[in-house]
Image: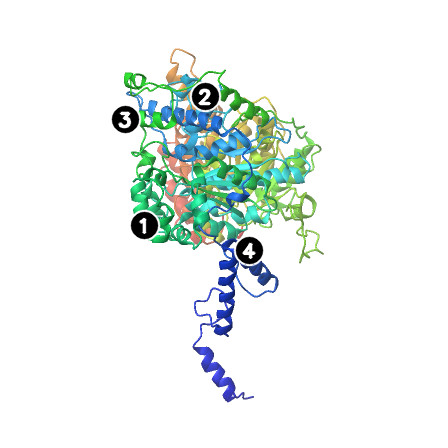
């Protein structure tokens, strides 16, 4: 059938062809106005309204029209940014409830002591660094919070959680000094944790180093924001699940504008909005500077962040100008000043604060005669005293109050400040201010005068390296006021506690099935773990404390069976008809759901893991996170976040599923993990295991739970990392009299050979244990060698034990020598030792120095690739026959077998032919 185009249609086509596709797109630069004359009339009406009723009324009408346009589905976008002024108008500011003069007085003392803490740490012979300017820029932000908002842990609804910007830590120490919680000796121990022990202070917020003081590590920039989001998520989670009512708690995260360039800083904003985390407040210190220079010299970071957060669904409050600007803005009837504020780039605003009032008058106000006229009655000093909003107590209080009372959304406060504020012209706004650690004598005197500190010139001149701290004494009215404010808010902040509800740990029945093996059914260790987890979830008075965390791979790991029973946590419930609703394993979401399903999002998963794993401390209610993930995308992708979790003393289990260089080999290079056990070994808070069998997993998990919450271990603040695999095999029944201590500590013998002949010891872990058993049989049948097989459940724990023994022997030569556990276990074993894993050589090489005899290893040391398991293992020479050849070589070198046997074995097994390999099951898909 032919179609013809009419002349009218052709004309329309030609006319439309000159217009950008989708010309009604509100963002189109080529939008065509259908009736320009009528549009002009509407514009004139708006002009007349503003002339008669003012800009405020004009704004009201426009906002109403925008909302109405959305209701009518007109496709008009809401404006993502507002003018470069305060969100809260001066006439809408609440009354300030405190005594501003008293609070300003001791805020100055805190600012002085914070700077002196860093300055004194640069004295001769010390020089340990520190940062002065970050706290100087944010002191008012913190003090409004400490005096009026941050609730301590004895508050009726529980304490708030405060994420203090890492570089601002001296300010927190200085406040604790006024509170009597820290001494001058401790302040002088800043960054000298061992040499000044027991009174040293950590450089930044580090709970592991100051476990009664700091709650959250923040100085790895970007982790504070994402961790704060999931901390707020945890409060909602425990409340919705009925574990604890945390509904009155707030999370406050103090962040830097430069820090917001980190991917983790912005990458989870939508989670906070989607879940309605109205208990979450970001306070971004917008001093316009990062470590080296401007954040956005040519742009406006506050406007950028406003657009970003508003687009993500957050409530945005801007605190840009101090009260000194209110009169100017009220008199700016034609918007000249407002326009200057809107168009001036951040680089210029930074420069203004390094100059003086005359410079600001000429280079800011002077760009528009109308704006210049607004300050014609101002002296240069008065122009210079026009403050940024982040330094104005009343403006900040209004923002904090609005944020804490806002419902339905998380809130971000964008506070405009000056980096190095109050420290004098050598510091304020300078590009180098972040690196400036100490002050000259003139700097000290100027700063003292600015802060009105009652310290004399002679006191400063006596030793400029050690200017005195200032504390007026406990009886001073300001100190009494400070204490009263903290008492009213429920205690001092920050404070970390570790008292929690005691758990009833599972009895033997929870682990019984794992010890029975799998019968004739072949299952992978991933499934063996999931079955154990299922039984633990059912454990009475314990199972509800387990929190599975899944980054969108539940079906891969066989965990979709938990969906109908444990359910997926969603505070909004499930308001759609699930496509699989008729299936047994239907996808079910619920506000009472137990599973935290974070989507394709390992960074968010670790943040959730950290929050849940420290619930015992933060909420006083222990939860046990079980984070299951592709092992390749765990430590390799999120090692920094896991390091911070260790600092925060997180407790829980991380399960690196589909592990091994050749076990998931169908997926290829990016999925082939042969090194996560090395990465995990670098984290002192991680206890790593590579189990082969279900019963090993059961004993390891049980020991982990006992260590974390049994109350008897000296170091319960650990995370267990288990690598498990997707290659199915028959799981054996736990042997009678199994060496449980050996399983937990890292090594136990699983098979001995009765063959008469040269002796060898085969050591393997994880999925490689069956290869060692295959090699044991080949050695006996083909070469007359008698080999025993050892399952090494933890190379890392054996190494740590060995290093501890070595260190003791090094430092205490007069005492009885300690023998490493692995050395003791292998001391009676004859022959060479040969180790194999589905990981790099370096994994078993961790114990080389502690093996009492000749030791050789096999490993997969290159990138992975897509192929069959058998071919990949033959390529890397880690399969059963390769282990045989390596063992024969070791025996030949010792003169215990004929020197020709290794080559005979190579020829017999066609070791150079990848197609000759047959170790392992077919497959390799996820």
Indicate whether 758 appears above or below 124. below
Q: Residues within 10 Å of mark 2 (few under 14, many from 20)?
A: many
Question: In the picture provided, is 292 more to the left or to the right than 827?
Answer: left
Q: CA distance from mark 2 to mark 4?
A: 48 Å
Residue drawn at the location 41% of the way across and 18% of the way down: 184
Q: CA distance from mark 3 to mark 2?
A: 25 Å
Element assignment for label 4: helix
Q: Position of residue 305 (x, y in %)?
A: 45, 48
- Asked whether residue 924 is in view, the answer is no
Q: Disc 3, disc 2: CB below 8 Å?
A: no
Q: Which residue is mark 3?
A: 442
Query: Quick one: label 1 or label 2, which is nearer the N terminus?
Result: 2
Q: Which residue is mark 2?
A: 177
Q: CA distance from mark 1 to mark 3?
A: 33 Å
Q: Which residue is mark 1?
A: 366
Q: Nearer the viewer, mark 1 or mark 3?
A: 1
Q: CA distance from mark 1 to mark 4?
A: 31 Å
Tally the marks.
4
Q: Residues within 10 Å of mark 4 (few under 14, many from 20)?
A: few
Q: Residues within 10 Å of mark 1 (few under 14, many from 20)?
A: some
Dot label at residue 1:
none
Dot label at residue 60:
4
Query: Quick one: label 2 or label 4, which is nearer the N terminus?
Result: 4
Element assignment for label 2: helix
């Amino acid at each position: 059938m032919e179609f013809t185009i009419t002349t009218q249609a052709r004309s329309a086509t030609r006319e439309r062809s000159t217009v950008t596709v989708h010309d009604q797109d509100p963002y189109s630069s080529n939008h065509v106005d259908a009736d320009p004359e009528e549009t002009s009339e509407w514009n004139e009406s708006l002009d007349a309204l503003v002339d008669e009723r003012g800009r405020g009324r004009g704004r009201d009408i426009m906002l109403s029209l925008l909302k109405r346009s959305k209701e009518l589905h007109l496709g008009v976008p809401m404006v993502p940014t507002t003018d470069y002024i305060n969100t809260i108008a001066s006439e809408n500011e609440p009354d300030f409830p405190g005594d501003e003069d008293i609070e300003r007085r001791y805020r100055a003392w805190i600012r002085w002591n914070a700077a002196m803490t860093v300055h004194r740490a640069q004295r001769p012979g010390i020089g340990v660094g520190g940062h002065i300017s970050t706290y100087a820029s944010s002191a008012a932000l913190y003090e409004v919070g400490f005096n009026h908002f941050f609730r301590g842990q004895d508050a009726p609804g529980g304490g708030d959680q405060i994420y203090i910007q890492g570089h601002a830590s001296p300010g927190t120490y200085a406040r604790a000094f006024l509170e009597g919680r820290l001494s001058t000796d401790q302040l002088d121990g800043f960054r000298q944790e061992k040499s000044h022990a027991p009174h040293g202070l950590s450089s930044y917020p580090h709970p592991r180093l100051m476990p009664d003081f700091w709650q959250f590590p923040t100085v790895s920039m970007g982790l504070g924001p994402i961790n704060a989001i999931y901390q707020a998520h945890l409060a909602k989670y425990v409340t919705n699940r009925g574990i604890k009512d945390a509904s009155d708690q707030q999370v406050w995260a103090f962040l830097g504008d430069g820090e917001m360039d980190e991917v983790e800083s912005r990458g989870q904003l939508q989670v906070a909005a989607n879940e309605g985390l109205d208990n979450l407040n970001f306070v971004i210190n917008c001093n316009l500077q990062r470590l080296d220079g401007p954040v956005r010299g040519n742009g406006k970071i506050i406007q950028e962040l406003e657009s970003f957060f508003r687009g993500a669904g957050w409530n945005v409050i801007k605190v840009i100008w101090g009260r000194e600007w209110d009169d100017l803005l009220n008199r700016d009837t034609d918007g000249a000043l407002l326009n200057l504020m809107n168009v001036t780039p951040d680089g210029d605003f930074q420069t203004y604060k390094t100059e003086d009032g005359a410079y600001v008058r000429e280079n800011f106000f002077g760009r528009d005669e109308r704006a210049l006229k607004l300050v014609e009655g101002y002296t240069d000093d008065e122009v210079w005293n026009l403050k940024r909003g982040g330094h104005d107590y009343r403006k900040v209080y209004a923002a904090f109050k609005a944020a804490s009372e806002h419902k339905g959304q998380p809130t971000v406060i964008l506070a405009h400040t000056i980096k190095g504020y109050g420290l004098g012209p050598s510091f304020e706004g300078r590009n180098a201010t972040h690196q400036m650690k100490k002050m000259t004598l003139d700097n000290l005197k100027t700063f003292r005068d600015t802060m009105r500190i009652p310290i004399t010139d002679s006191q400063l001149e006596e030793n400029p390296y050690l200017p005195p701290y200032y504390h007026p004494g406990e009886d001073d009215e300001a100190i009494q006021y400070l204490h009263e404010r903290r008492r009213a808010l429920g205690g001092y902040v920050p404070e970390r506690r570790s008292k929690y509800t005691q758990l009833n740990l599972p009895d033997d029945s929870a682990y019984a099935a794992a010890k029975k093996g799998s019968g004739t059914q072949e299952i992978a260790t991933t499934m063996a773990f999931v079955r154990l987890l299922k039984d633990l979830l059912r454990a009475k008075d314990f199972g509800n404390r387990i929190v599975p965390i899944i980054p969108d791979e539940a079906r891969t790991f066989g965990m979709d069976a938990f969906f109908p029973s444990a359910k997926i946590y969603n505070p909004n419930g499930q308001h759609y008809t699930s496509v699989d609703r008729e299936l047994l394993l239907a996808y079910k979401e619920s506000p009472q759901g137990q599973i935290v399903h974070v989507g394709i999002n390992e960074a968010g998963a670790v943040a959730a893991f950290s929050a849940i794993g420290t619930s015992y401390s933060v909420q006083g209610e222990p939860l046990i996170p079980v984070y299951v993930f592709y092992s390749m995308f765990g430590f390799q992708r999120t090692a920094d976040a896991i390091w911070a979790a260790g600092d925060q003393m997180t407790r829980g289990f991380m399960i690196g599923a589909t592990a091994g260089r050749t076990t998931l080999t169908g997926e290829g290079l990016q999925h082939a993990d042969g090194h996560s056990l090395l990465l995990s070994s670098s984290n002192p808070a991680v206890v790593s295991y590579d189990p082969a069998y279900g019963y090993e997993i059961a004993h390891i998990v049980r020991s982990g739970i006992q260590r974390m919450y049994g109350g008897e271990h000296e170091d319960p603040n650990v995370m267990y990392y288990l690598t498990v695999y997707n290659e199915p095999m028959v799981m054996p029944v736990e042997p009678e009299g199994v060496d449980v201590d050996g399983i937990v500590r890292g090594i136990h013998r699983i098979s001995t050979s009765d063959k008469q002949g040269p002796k060898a010891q085969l050591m393997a872990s994880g999925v490689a244990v069956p290869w060692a058993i295959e090699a044991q049989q080949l050695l006996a049948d083909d070469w007359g060698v008698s080999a025993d097989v050892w399952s090494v459940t933890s190379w890392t724990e054996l190494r740590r034990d060995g290093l501890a023994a070595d260190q003791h022997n090094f430092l205490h030569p007069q005492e009885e020598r300690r023998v490493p556990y692995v050395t003791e276990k292998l001391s009676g074993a004859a022959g060479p030792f040969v180790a194999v894993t589905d990981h790099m050589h370096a994994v078993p090489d961790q114990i080389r120095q502690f093996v009492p005899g000749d030791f050789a290893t096999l490993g997969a040391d290159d990138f992975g690739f897509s192929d069959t398991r058998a071919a990949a293992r033959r390529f890397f020479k880690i399969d059963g026959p390769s282990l045989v050849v390596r063992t024969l070589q070791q025996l030949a070198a010792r003169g215990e077998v004929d020197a020709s046997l290794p080559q005979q074995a190579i020829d017999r097994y066609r070791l150079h032919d990848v197609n000759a390999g047959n170790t392992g099951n077919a497959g390799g898909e996820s």
